[in-house]
Image (cartoon, helix red, strand yellow):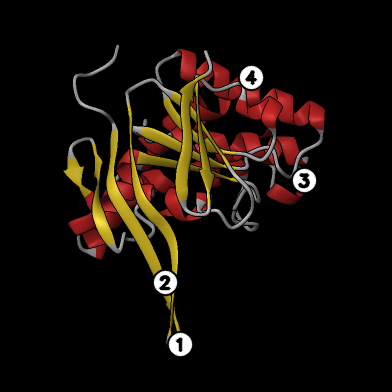
Amino acid sequence: MKSDKPVVLVKDVCKTYKLDQLEVPVLFDIHFSVDSGEFISIMGPSGCGKSTLMNLIGCLDRPTSGSIRLDSVDISKLHDTELAKIRNRKIGFVFQTFNLLPRLSSIENVELPLIYSGITSAERDKKAKEALDSVGILSRAAHMPNQLSGGERQRVAIARAIVNSPSVILADEPTGNLDSRSGQEVMKIFDKLNSSGVTIIMVTHDTNIAERGSRLVRLFDGRIIEDKKIK
Protein backbone atom coordinates (compact mmCIF):
# COMPACT_ATOMS: atom_id res chain seq x y z
CA MET A 1 0.00 0.00 0.00
CA LYS A 2 1.41 3.37 -1.02
CA SER A 3 1.43 6.30 1.36
CA ASP A 4 0.48 9.85 0.42
CA LYS A 5 4.04 11.06 0.91
CA PRO A 6 7.09 9.66 -0.91
CA VAL A 7 9.57 7.51 1.00
CA VAL A 8 12.41 9.51 -0.58
CA LEU A 9 12.24 13.06 -1.93
CA VAL A 10 15.38 14.47 -3.56
CA LYS A 11 14.89 18.15 -4.31
CA ASP A 12 17.27 20.38 -6.30
CA VAL A 13 20.33 18.51 -5.01
CA CYS A 14 23.84 19.51 -6.07
CA LYS A 15 27.06 17.93 -4.85
CA THR A 16 30.55 19.35 -5.22
CA TYR A 17 33.72 17.80 -3.80
CA LYS A 18 36.80 19.80 -2.88
CA LEU A 19 40.13 18.29 -3.89
CA ASP A 20 42.97 20.47 -2.62
CA GLN A 21 42.19 23.83 -4.22
CA LEU A 22 39.88 22.41 -6.85
CA GLU A 23 36.11 22.12 -6.71
CA VAL A 24 34.74 19.14 -8.60
CA PRO A 25 30.99 19.25 -9.27
CA VAL A 26 29.42 15.77 -9.41
CA LEU A 27 25.64 16.25 -9.25
CA PHE A 28 23.54 19.09 -10.67
CA ASP A 29 19.93 19.94 -9.74
CA ILE A 30 18.82 16.38 -9.05
CA HIS A 31 15.09 16.18 -8.39
CA PHE A 32 13.03 13.00 -8.06
CA SER A 33 10.86 11.12 -5.60
CA VAL A 34 10.42 7.47 -4.67
CA ASP A 35 7.04 6.15 -3.58
CA SER A 36 6.54 3.33 -1.12
CA GLY A 37 6.87 -0.03 -2.85
CA GLU A 38 8.68 1.22 -5.95
CA PHE A 39 11.65 -0.62 -7.46
CA ILE A 40 13.87 1.97 -9.13
CA SER A 41 16.87 1.11 -11.30
CA ILE A 42 19.53 3.81 -11.70
CA MET A 43 21.83 3.55 -14.72
CA GLY A 44 24.56 5.65 -16.30
CA PRO A 45 28.23 5.53 -17.31
CA SER A 46 31.05 5.37 -14.75
CA GLY A 47 31.61 8.72 -13.09
CA CYS A 48 28.12 10.06 -13.82
CA GLY A 49 27.24 10.41 -10.11
CA LYS A 50 25.27 7.21 -9.39
CA SER A 51 27.23 6.17 -6.30
CA THR A 52 27.35 9.76 -5.04
CA LEU A 53 23.55 9.94 -5.25
CA MET A 54 23.22 6.63 -3.40
CA ASN A 55 25.57 7.86 -0.68
CA LEU A 56 23.47 10.99 -0.23
CA ILE A 57 20.19 9.07 0.01
CA GLY A 58 21.87 6.57 2.34
CA CYS A 59 22.95 9.23 4.85
CA LEU A 60 26.63 8.54 4.13
CA ASP A 61 27.20 12.06 2.79
CA ARG A 62 25.46 15.43 2.61
CA PRO A 63 24.47 17.48 -0.44
CA THR A 64 26.24 20.76 -1.13
CA SER A 65 22.82 22.32 -1.75
CA GLY A 66 19.24 21.15 -2.01
CA SER A 67 17.45 18.75 0.33
CA ILE A 68 16.77 15.05 0.75
CA ARG A 69 13.80 13.79 2.75
CA LEU A 70 13.51 10.24 4.02
CA ASP A 71 10.07 9.43 5.42
CA SER A 72 9.45 13.21 5.46
CA VAL A 73 12.59 13.89 7.59
CA ASP A 74 15.09 16.30 6.03
CA ILE A 75 18.24 14.20 6.41
CA SER A 76 20.42 16.83 4.72
CA LYS A 77 20.30 18.94 7.89
CA LEU A 78 20.93 16.28 10.53
CA HIS A 79 24.04 15.88 12.68
CA ASP A 80 26.26 12.82 12.31
CA THR A 81 24.74 11.03 15.34
CA GLU A 82 21.21 11.55 14.06
CA LEU A 83 22.25 10.42 10.58
CA ALA A 84 23.73 7.22 11.99
CA LYS A 85 20.49 6.42 13.83
CA ILE A 86 18.36 6.98 10.74
CA ARG A 87 20.81 5.06 8.57
CA ASN A 88 20.60 2.05 10.87
CA ARG A 89 16.83 2.16 11.34
CA LYS A 90 15.50 3.18 7.93
CA ILE A 91 18.03 2.07 5.30
CA GLY A 92 19.26 -1.36 4.28
CA PHE A 93 22.47 -1.46 2.22
CA VAL A 94 23.48 -4.15 -0.28
CA PHE A 95 26.92 -3.67 -1.88
CA GLN A 96 28.70 -5.23 -4.85
CA THR A 97 31.50 -6.40 -2.53
CA PHE A 98 29.08 -7.77 0.12
CA ASN A 99 30.86 -5.94 3.00
CA LEU A 100 30.53 -8.83 5.44
CA LEU A 101 32.86 -8.87 8.43
CA PRO A 102 35.20 -11.84 7.84
CA ARG A 103 35.54 -12.88 11.50
CA LEU A 104 31.78 -13.09 12.09
CA SER A 105 29.47 -15.93 11.06
CA SER A 106 26.53 -15.36 8.74
CA ILE A 107 24.06 -14.93 11.58
CA GLU A 108 26.43 -12.63 13.49
CA ASN A 109 26.78 -10.42 10.40
CA VAL A 110 23.00 -10.24 10.07
CA GLU A 111 22.62 -9.35 13.76
CA LEU A 112 24.89 -6.29 13.53
CA PRO A 113 22.19 -3.69 12.74
CA LEU A 114 20.10 -5.08 15.61
CA ILE A 115 22.97 -4.69 18.07
CA TYR A 116 23.17 -0.99 17.19
CA SER A 117 19.40 -0.77 17.72
CA GLY A 118 19.72 -2.06 21.30
CA ILE A 119 17.65 -5.21 20.76
CA THR A 120 18.06 -8.10 23.23
CA SER A 121 20.19 -11.12 22.34
CA ALA A 122 17.23 -13.50 22.13
CA GLU A 123 15.27 -11.16 19.86
CA ARG A 124 18.37 -10.56 17.70
CA ASP A 125 18.77 -14.29 17.22
CA LYS A 126 15.10 -14.70 16.30
CA LYS A 127 15.04 -11.83 13.81
CA ALA A 128 18.36 -12.79 12.21
CA LYS A 129 17.20 -16.37 11.68
CA GLU A 130 13.94 -15.13 10.14
CA ALA A 131 15.90 -12.86 7.77
CA LEU A 132 18.28 -15.66 6.76
CA ASP A 133 15.36 -18.01 6.22
CA SER A 134 13.55 -15.46 4.04
CA VAL A 135 16.49 -15.43 1.59
CA GLY A 136 16.94 -19.20 1.67
CA ILE A 137 20.22 -19.45 3.53
CA LEU A 138 19.33 -20.31 7.13
CA SER A 139 21.24 -23.59 6.78
CA ARG A 140 24.47 -21.55 6.43
CA ALA A 141 23.88 -19.43 9.54
CA ALA A 142 26.99 -20.71 11.34
CA HIS A 143 29.30 -20.47 8.33
CA MET A 144 31.96 -17.79 8.00
CA PRO A 145 32.03 -15.58 4.88
CA ASN A 146 35.06 -17.42 3.45
CA GLN A 147 33.05 -20.65 3.59
CA LEU A 148 30.32 -19.21 1.36
CA SER A 149 30.03 -18.75 -2.38
CA GLY A 150 29.58 -15.25 -3.80
CA GLY A 151 25.85 -15.78 -4.21
CA GLU A 152 25.54 -17.04 -0.64
CA ARG A 153 27.47 -14.04 0.69
CA GLN A 154 25.13 -11.70 -1.14
CA ARG A 155 22.13 -13.51 0.35
CA VAL A 156 23.61 -12.95 3.81
CA ALA A 157 24.14 -9.29 2.93
CA ILE A 158 20.50 -8.99 1.84
CA ALA A 159 19.36 -10.64 5.08
CA ARG A 160 21.40 -8.06 7.00
CA ALA A 161 19.84 -5.28 4.93
CA ILE A 162 16.26 -6.34 5.68
CA VAL A 163 16.61 -7.47 9.31
CA ASN A 164 15.59 -4.05 10.68
CA SER A 165 12.60 -3.76 8.30
CA PRO A 166 14.00 -0.57 6.71
CA SER A 167 12.00 2.00 4.75
CA VAL A 168 14.20 1.50 1.69
CA ILE A 169 16.91 -0.85 0.45
CA LEU A 170 19.82 0.72 -1.45
CA ALA A 171 21.56 -1.82 -3.69
CA ASP A 172 24.77 -0.72 -5.42
CA GLU A 173 25.62 -3.18 -8.25
CA PRO A 174 24.27 -6.13 -6.20
CA THR A 175 25.03 -8.64 -8.98
CA GLY A 176 28.31 -7.08 -10.12
CA ASN A 177 30.55 -9.73 -8.52
CA LEU A 178 28.32 -12.71 -9.29
CA ASP A 179 28.05 -15.16 -12.17
CA SER A 180 24.85 -14.95 -14.21
CA ARG A 181 23.08 -17.79 -12.38
CA SER A 182 23.83 -16.41 -8.92
CA GLY A 183 22.89 -12.94 -10.13
CA GLN A 184 19.48 -14.17 -11.30
CA GLU A 185 18.91 -15.93 -7.96
CA VAL A 186 19.70 -12.71 -6.11
CA MET A 187 17.34 -10.76 -8.36
CA LYS A 188 14.55 -13.24 -7.59
CA ILE A 189 15.03 -12.33 -3.93
CA PHE A 190 14.74 -8.62 -4.77
CA ASP A 191 11.61 -9.36 -6.83
CA LYS A 192 10.09 -11.21 -3.86
CA LEU A 193 10.98 -8.42 -1.44
CA ASN A 194 9.51 -5.79 -3.73
CA SER A 195 6.33 -7.84 -4.22
CA SER A 196 5.94 -7.84 -0.42
CA GLY A 197 6.08 -4.02 -0.41
CA VAL A 198 9.78 -3.31 0.15
CA THR A 199 11.05 -0.14 -1.57
CA ILE A 200 14.25 -0.72 -3.56
CA ILE A 201 16.67 1.69 -5.24
CA MET A 202 19.30 -0.16 -7.26
CA VAL A 203 22.34 0.99 -9.24
CA THR A 204 23.38 -1.32 -12.07
CA HIS A 205 25.30 -1.31 -15.36
CA ASP A 206 23.36 -4.34 -16.62
CA THR A 207 20.31 -3.51 -18.76
CA ASN A 208 18.75 -6.93 -18.13
CA ILE A 209 19.08 -6.44 -14.38
CA ALA A 210 17.75 -2.88 -14.59
CA GLU A 211 14.63 -4.11 -16.35
CA ARG A 212 13.66 -6.10 -13.24
CA GLY A 213 12.70 -2.78 -11.68
CA SER A 214 9.47 -0.86 -12.22
CA ARG A 215 11.12 2.45 -13.10
CA LEU A 216 14.37 3.52 -14.76
CA VAL A 217 16.35 6.66 -13.93
CA ARG A 218 19.33 7.46 -16.17
CA LEU A 219 22.14 9.78 -15.13
CA PHE A 220 24.68 11.42 -17.43
CA ASP A 221 27.35 13.91 -16.35
CA GLY A 222 25.66 14.44 -13.00
CA ARG A 223 22.17 15.11 -14.33
CA ILE A 224 19.02 13.04 -14.74
CA ILE A 225 18.43 12.64 -18.47
CA GLU A 226 15.62 10.08 -18.30
CA ASP A 227 13.04 8.97 -15.73
CA LYS A 228 10.42 6.53 -16.96
CA LYS A 229 8.20 3.68 -15.88
CA ILE A 230 9.29 0.33 -17.31
CA LYS A 231 6.54 -1.87 -15.82
Identify the residue position indicated by label 1 in the image: 20
Please name the amino acid that badge 3 sits on. Gln
Q: Residue at x 30, y 11 (%)?
A: 1
Q: Nearer the viewer, residue 139 or 113?
A: 113
Badge 4: residue crowd in 10 Å (few <14, some 14–19, many ≥20): some
Q: Secondary structure at mark 3?
A: helix
Q: Is residue 124 left or right of residue 35?
A: right
Identify the residue position indicated by label 2 in the image: 17
Identify the residue position indicated by label 3 in the image: 147
Question: Which dot, 1 or 4, sits closer to the camera?
Answer: 1
Mark 1–mark 4 Cα distance, whole angstroms, equals 44 Å
Mark 3–mark 2 Cα distance, whole angstroms, equals 39 Å
Q: Is residue 150 left or right of residue 229?
A: right
Q: Secondary structure at mark 4?
A: helix
User: Which label was assigned to residue 188?
Assistant: 4
Q: Point out residue 148 in the picture as x, y percentages from the top left corner.
A: 75, 42
Q: In this picture, is 189 found above or below 161?
A: above
Q: In this picture, is 164 found above or below 27?
A: above
Q: Is residue 180 left or right of residue 30?
A: right
Q: Which residue, as the protein is rendered here, is positioned at the far front?
A: 225
Question: Which dot, 2 or 4, sits closer to the camera?
Answer: 2
Q: Secondary structure at mark 2?
A: strand
Q: Earlier in the sequence, mark 4 or mark 3?
A: 3
